Image (cartoon, rainbow, N blue to C red):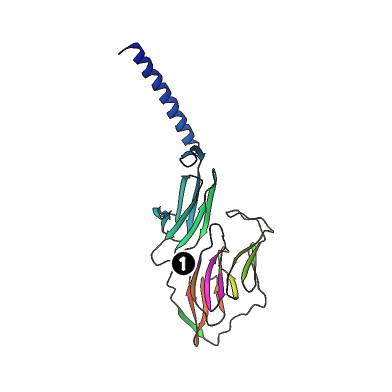
Amino acid sequence: MSRKTRWILFYSAVIIFFVLSYVMVVYALGYKYDVTSWEFVRTGSFRLVVNARAKVYVNNSLAGETSFLGDTYAKGRLLPRTYAVRLEREGYHLWEKNITIAAGYFADFPKIMLVPIELPTEPVASSSFGFPMPDSNIRVTKGKSLAFDQHTVSIEWLDDTDFQPFHRAGDFETVFGVPTVIDDVQWYRDREHLLVATNGKLYFYEIDARGGINKYELTTLEGPFVYSEDDNAVYKTDGNQVVRFKI
């Protein structure tokens, strides 16, 4: 091997060493090469905390499952993009969001509720049972107050929140609207979901509007309903009796 060849090999090795070292440092700092912008960009991540174990799909591809302990799922080193994320569990409604990942940021969804499709009812009383009828369209709960009119539901935060989406006391937001007339709205026990009666049906709504709001039809209604936090059950009339179902 000639001296010139040895020098070429030596300098090539030095260049490769520095290039690989640079790539490793950039990777360790949370950067990733983006082929669409032809540059290294800082990545982001997201976490899902769910009430039940479920499969996780990202952009329609199976990405994994929520963990056995805590029913959580986290995914990191994501390029700044909007990702279609879906949770699936047999016998439950789908949960779907378009999660936007910003460079260097962590998107957290700590209050996800998967709701069963089938909610069996059981009789509890005769139809003579009386339902309380609030005379106001305002519902105050711990840290929040909601108000509804014929077509919209708005929330005012009374305290600062310590989880995403962050709110400060005094924040006010119209979280969603419906085309039909709203008859009643009641807080679910986690204070992050609502029970909404409209057009003879009862719906379960989330209030986290990031990436779209999930809603599920729970049941039909013949009149008013009552939600009980104590047993996590909805009470409603069904013919000549009062029935309940647990969520």
| Element type where label 1 sits in the image | loop
Q: Is residue 34 left or right of residue 90?
A: right
* Residue drawn where x is 45% and y is 78% of the image: 121
Q: Residue at x 62, y 68 (%)?
A: 153
Residue 151 falls left or right of residue 23: right
> Which residue sits furthest left?
1
Judge left or right: residue 191 versus residue 51: right
Q: How many marks?
A: 1
Q: Amino acid at mark 1?
A: Val
Q: Quadrant of residue 133?
A: bottom right
Give x and y (percent) for residue 45.
Answer: 50, 47
Relative to 164, say whether 186 is above or below: below
Q: Quadrant of the N terminus?
A: top left
Q: In the orientation shown, which residue stands out farthest toward the right?
A: 170
Residue range of the region highlighted in magenta in the rendering: 195-215
Viewer-closest of 211 and 217: 211
Residue 230 image offset from top left, x and y in percent: 54, 71
Is 46 colored magenta in this rendering? no
Answer few, some or many: residues within 10 Å of disc 1's Cα (few below 14, many 20 plus, some between 14 and 19): many
> From what the image shows, is residue 76 above or below residue 165?
above
Q: Which residue is mark 1?
A: 115
Q: Residue at x 52, y 69 (%)?
A: 204
Q: Is residue 209 magenta?
A: yes
- Residue 202 position, x and y percent, is 52, 74
Instruction: Locate residue 7, reporting x and y percent.
Output: 38, 15
